[in-house]
Amino acid sequence: MTAELLGWTSTMYAFARAFVATAPQRSRPRSLPYHATDANACTQLRTALQRERGFTITELMVSIGIVAILSSIGAPLMTGMIASQQVKTATFDFYSALSFARSEAIKRNAIVTILPRSGNFANGYDLRTGGDTVRSEVGSVAVAFTVPSGVALAFDGYGRLTSPGQYQVELTSARDSTVPKRCLVISPTGRPSIRVDTNHDGNCVNG
């Protein structure tokens, strides 16, 4: 996707250079003596004025049309790149929160739970131990979170998950379905890892 965007940018740059190179050049008419009234002087003045001609309506409309076409091609690429970056950022933020929660659980020898706000991690989430909030994160409505239903995401004093088996959080773009899904897989020992569904088969584990 980045390569396609760079190609579109290069095309726009080449078009701009070609358009400037072929644009009619303006030149200032030579100053004529106030007493020059012969036919030759009039011809020189008319020629100089003709050189002052700018862009015609047709030229401007063609240029605007080309720019509009190139923009319509590049806009989807830009939208997809932004959506992909939003998923990446949300994934790294959640990974950081997991690592911090596990570290705090070991340091405090207590259970640290990651709680979504209003039942949705996209609204943000808080890291809590007992009645204290040790860290809060802002969510992103542009990213959809999918987590196991009815299973708490928490670490005990040994840094392990309090629930049996591994815990997987899936992050997808809420605006562009073509963006690869990213998964945060937490092993029973509490170690998180990032996986990417590069082949778009819905499974992050096999790539």
Image: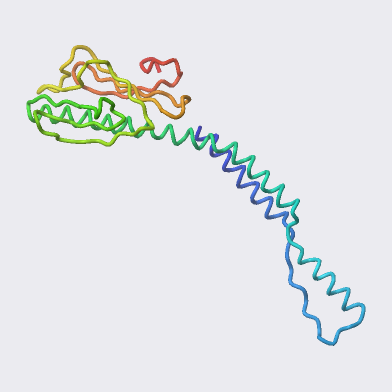
Q: Quadrant of residue 50?
A: bottom right
Name the quadrant of the C terminus: top left
Looking at the picture, tell me which residue is in the foreground, 2 or 93: 93
Q: How many marks?
A: 0
Q: Quadrant of residue 156?
A: top left
Q: Is residue 184 above or below residue 64?
A: above
Where in the figure is residue 115, as x and y percent of width and height? 20, 27
- What percent of the width, then of the height, locates residue 64? 66, 48
Q: Is residue 64 left or right of residue 163?
A: right
The residue that appears at 74% across and 72% down in the rendered structure is 28
With 195 as the anchor, is 29 left or right in this view? right
Work out whether 207 lies above or below 23: above
Residue 191, given in percent of the width and then of the height, sits at 22, 22
Identity of the residue drawn at 70% across and 55% down: 21
Residue extending farthest to the front is 118
In the image: residue 13, left or right of residue 108: right
Task: Decide if residue 38 is on the left or right side of residue 87.
Answer: right
